[in-house]
Amino acid sequence: MELPGALQLGELAAAFAAVPIFPLFDTAYFIVSVLYLKYEPGAEEMSRKSPFASWLCAMLHCFGSYILADLLLGESPIHYFSNNSSVILATAVWYLIFFCPMNLFYKCVSFLPVKLIFVAMKEVVRVRKIAAGVHHAHHQYHHGWFIMMATGWVKGSGVALMSNFEQLLRGVWKPETNEILHMSFPTKASLYGTVLFTLQQTHWLPVSEANLIFFFTMFMIVCKVFMTATHSHASPFAPVEGFICPVFFGSVSGGHTSHHNQHGHSHEASYQPPPPVKSKEELNEGTRKRKAKKAE
C-alpha cells in the first residue's frame, strides 16, 4: 500500500511541476505585485502626477527578480523585457489597478477571498522561479554553490531586495527599510528554499526536483495565505531562529542594554532639573515686599 501511494504522490508532484505558469499564474503574480505597489504611501498620487514613473515601479515589482538574476549572471538586465507577452500583461494589470473607472478592478482583486487565491498562485510562481534560478546558475557554474544560492534567492525575493531603488523612483528614501537588514518572511523563505534547491541540484538532498517543488510550494501557500488572511507579520521561522541564533551567533541584548544604561546614567548625571515654579502666593508676597522697600 505504501509503494502505490508513493507512486501516486510522485506522479502528482511531477504533474504539478509540469503545469505552465503563463498566463494564469503569471497574471496572479502581477496582480499581487502591483497591489503591493498601490498600498505604498504616495503611490496613488504618483500614478496621477507621473504615470511613467508609476509604470516603471510596477515593472520593477513584476520583473525585479529577473533583473537582479541577470545582473548576477553577467547578462543584460533588460533581457526579460524582450518577452513582449509578459510585459504587455503586466502593463495591463498595472493600468487596470490604478486607472480602472470607479476602481472596479482594484476592488475585485483586493476582496480578501479573491486576493487569497491570487496570493496562493503567486507562491507557485515564486517557488518555480527559485528552482529555475538555481538550475540556471548550476548550468553555468557546476560547482558554484554560493552562485546558485544567490541566484535562486534573488529570483524568489523579487523586488524586496531592490526596495530602496524602487523607493527612489517614487521620490522616497528610507535606508532603514533595507530588506537585508530587516528580512520579511518571503525573503527568508526564499533564502532557505534556495539552499534546499541547491542541495538537491548538487545531489546532496536525496529528493526529486518535482517533489521538492511540490512540498515547498505547499508550505509557502499555507504560510502566506494564513498570514494574509490574519494580517499577520510574524514569521513562522521566528521560534526556530529565536532558539538557534543565540546559540550560534550570541545575543546582543546584554551589551546593548549596558551600553544604553551607561549613556542613560551619564545623561542623568549631566541633567539638572529646572528650578521649581513659584506659586501665585509666593509671587504676590514678593511683589508686596518690593513695594514696601520702594515706599521706605
Image (cartoon, rainbow, N blue to C red):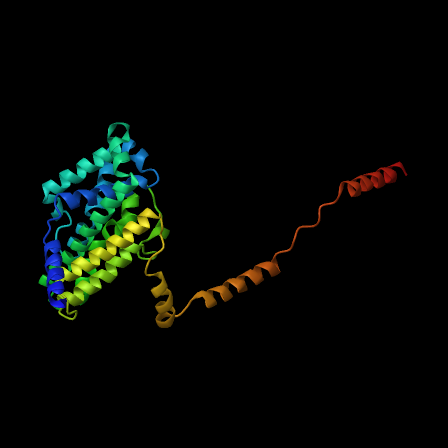
Picture quadrant where residue 85 is located: top left
In the rendered structure, the answer to whether residue 247 lies left or right of residue 17 reads: right
- Residue in view at x 39 percent, y 70 percent: 250
Picture quadrant where residue 269 is located: bottom right
Q: Position of residue 229 (x, y in %)?
A: 32, 47
- Residue in view at x 19 percent, y 47 percent: 63
Whether 276 is drawn above or below 56: the answer is below
| Viewer-side residue, 1 vs 106 | 1
Kindly tell me whether residue 147 is visible in this rendering. Answer: no
Image quarter where the C terminus lies is top right
Image quarter where the N terminus lies is bottom left
| Viewer-side residue, 53 vs 112 | 112
Q: Position of residue 23 (x, y in %)?
A: 12, 43
Q: Position of residue 34 (x, y in %)?
A: 25, 41
Kindly tell me whether residue 19 is visible in this rendering. Answer: yes
Whether 266 is drawn above or below 56: the answer is below
- Residue in view at x 25 percent, y 31 percent: 99
- Residue in view at x 13 percent, y 50 percent: 76
